[in-house]
Amino acid sequence: MYEFNARHILDALTTTLKEPRELQLILDGGSPNDVPGPPQTTVSKLAARETLANSLQGRFQCVWAPVRDDHMTTNSFFPSAYHTKVSVRDGNSFWLSSGNWKDSGQPSIDPIKGPLPAGFSKSAFESKYNREWHVMSAQSGTRVKRLRRFIIHDITQAKPLQLPAPPLSPTETMRRTCLFQ
């Protein structure tokens, strides 16, 4: 996934991925600490990874895509970005999009079906959110298997190239310990 910062998508993943379901994810590192919007609607990639790792308790694998500009891996395959925007669910359906798992591309409200919040402004909504196109297909078969193979291939190739995580400061260690107990 190129971008992942929508808190409501993170919440949906932690809610729906119950045992025995697993999640394998490859992310473009970009700016992993950036939180591009208000904390009630967005989250950093690092926080998303940590939340999923804690929630899925060993059923989560996430690697950084080997992108030259990100400096998250020891080598790179991609010169400037990992623009893949696809997910496969349970081997029988897929989601393919022009957008990402970010707040501006995946709004938490449906402007067509609603419910719409009080004071909803169509023009404000259109200026804040992108017009992404999504294809969701609930079919097993060659297409789903091929997309899954591509994702697994990218993860397998990226896994040995991961840089070790930098050590946490004592303050950050204490903060994270208190958050997850």
Image (spheres, rainbow, N blue to C red):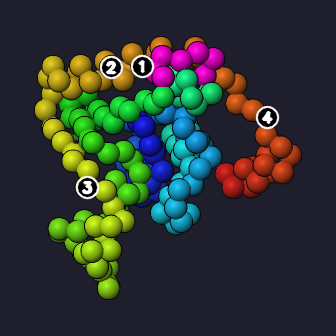
Quick one: SS at disc 1?
Answer: helix
Residue under numbered circle 3: 131
Residue under numbered circle 1: 154
Three-letter amino acid code of the residue under disc 2? Phe
Alpha carbon of mark 4 to alpha carbon of mark 3: how far? 40 Å
At a point 57% along the width and 29% down the height, the residue shown is 69
Placement of the N terminus among the 4 image quadrants: top left
At a point 35% along the width and 31% down the height, the residue shown is 84
Of residues 141 and 159, the one nearer the viewer is 159
Count neighbours of disc 1 (C-alpha within 10 A) and say few if under 14, some if 14 to 19, many if 20 or more. Answer: some
Residue 94, quarter of the rendered image: top left
Q: Do callouts 1 and 2 mark residues in contact (Cβ within 8 Å)? A: yes
Secondary structure character of the magenta stretch overall:
loop
Of residues 46 and 66, the one nearer the viewer is 66
Residue under numbered circle 4: 167
Farthest-out residue, bottom: 119
Q: Which residues are magenta?
A: 73-79
N-term-proximal mark, 4 vs 3: 3
Three-letter amino acid code of the residue under disc 4? Pro
Nearest to viewer (mark 3 / mark 2):
3
N-term-proximal mark, 3 vs 2: 3
At a point 66% along the width and 23% down the height, the residue shown is 163
Residue under numbered circle 2: 150
